[in-house]
Amino acid sequence: MSNFTLASARDALKAKKISSKELTTAYIKAVEAARPLNAYITETPDKALEMAAASDARLAKGEGGALEGLPLAIKDLFCTKGVRTTAGSKILGNFIPPYESTVTANLWKAGAVMLGKTNLDEFAMGSSNETSASGPVFNPWRDGTKKLVPGGSSGGSASAVAGDLCLAATGTDTGGSIRQPAAITGIVGLKPTYGRCSRWGIVAFASSLDQAGPMTKTVRDAAILLGSMASIDPKDSTSTDLPVPDYEKALEGGIKGLRVGIPREYRMDGAPPEIAALWDKGAEWLKAQGAEIVEVSLPHTKYALPTYYIVAPAEASSNLARYDGVRFGHRAKDVKGITDLYEKSRAEGFGLEVQRRILIGTYVLSSGYYDAYYARAQKLRTLIARDFTEAYTQCDVLLTPATPGPAFGLGENSDDPVAMYLNDVFTVTVNLAGLPGLSVPAGLTAGGLPLGLQLIGKAFDEGTLLRAGLALETAANFTHKPANWWSAS
């Protein structure tokens, strides 16, 4: 089953070469064998088999949706009715939603099968998937015997796709949380335009930045999955009322004449030579297929990380105020009054990284500091978005590195938050500007670890972005797979 992509499995099911039950059973066994990766927080084998049986019945009648019978993994930030949703946090450890997120409801309507809920950095706050209350996720790729992080926050989804523990998975991206883990696990990750997918029913981190997207084995699979995830949603005021194109059809036509911008500010001092060399090679690959390579400028790039780490924690501190030990979630015992309940419940329920970001966010929003930090960050965000608008007068998509380096070892950056935050240096600008970004596996380091390249598109032009991604994928011909070390653990 590991050779199946979302597209090939879909076609095999329609041709009745395999049943959804057979496919789902194989993945259930793979998930069980891969528990040393810790990619899943909650496995749902019984529910998966029930959904598969219903899909087989529809397929037998010649019916079914775009994802009929296809087993997926769902990041444990999406609320799933009747299935525990933890956001990787102790404070939501026993939360069972009475409702379904819009994105997952769309997937079930399309006939998809849920294998379970994948691990993530707590409340999606992290770049390594080490902050989860359910423990760290391990990257299926290893550096010799050294265990590596899978990136974050969607590390569980990335690990599950890279380790063939599902056909595809959902992720969310607030500052790079789909694209960064995709790049360092050797898979495809797409962060759509802000507003393309509904945020309703997704546990909120930073509301003006969060966006759901697909994590897949191929660019075609990302196009297929996005087509079912995306929708207009009256329950989400930031959901944009635009028709959802046929993204798979948008892959056709090639890239002859496409203008590909290379932002000069992304050539940063101290970046590993392998990153720059791969970036140059990516530009050559696209040029060889008829694209025009142009240099562009995004002058406010250097302000992106500090801007992001003011805006995102500020919104997080507001969003996470609802977890107070009163209405739902973890509640401290032996408390002396309501204030003591708040303080102890939050101290016990939130991990250190979440506490750090709440404190930063509360500080920058506080009286006397709001104008100095948050208001200035919002002005810079406007300038960063304007940079992209001006760049797109000269090009159709941008090509950049996806990460500043390959996967690193567990614990290597845990004591240095700034070093950890730098993993998002190439991705946060996209969220601040609300644009779509795509990470495509493009090569290996000398040590045999995956590296990705990032394409950035115009707002709501995922079709062009995916077409350029297919061209990049075709040229890179990345067929490498991690050795299965976890089944023997």
Image: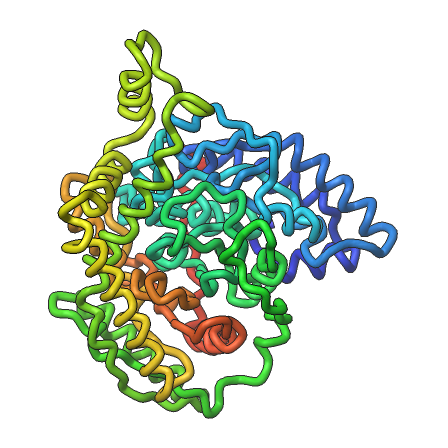
- Give the residue at x 43% y 46%: 159
Q: Is residue 58 left or right of residue 32?
A: right
Q: Could you say which is closer to the camera, residue 188 or residue 464?
A: 464
Residue 171 is situated, as x and y percent measured from the top left of the image, at 46, 50
Which one is nearer the viewer's eye here, 330 or 47? Answer: 330
Q: Is residue 219 above or below residue 14?
A: below
Residue nearer the viewer, 438 or 351: 351
| Residue 125 occupies quadrant | top left
Where does residue 1 sit, x and y in percent of width and height?
Answer: 61, 49
In the displayed structure image, the side of residue 376 where residue 436 appears, left or right: right
Query: At x 42% / y 83%, what residue is drawn?
Result: 396
The percent position of residue 479, horizontal first and vertical second, equals 46, 64
On the question of residue 318 being in view, the answer is yes
- Which residue in the rendered view is the most extreme toward the top? 334
Residue drawn at (30%, 36%) of the image:
131
Residue 440 makes an appearance in the image: no
Count of all numbered marks drawn on residues in the image: 0
Vertical placement of residue 250 versus 3, above or below? below
Left of 206 or right of it: where is 35?
Answer: right
Instruction: State the image coordinates of residue 134 (x, y, percent, origin top left).
Output: 38, 30
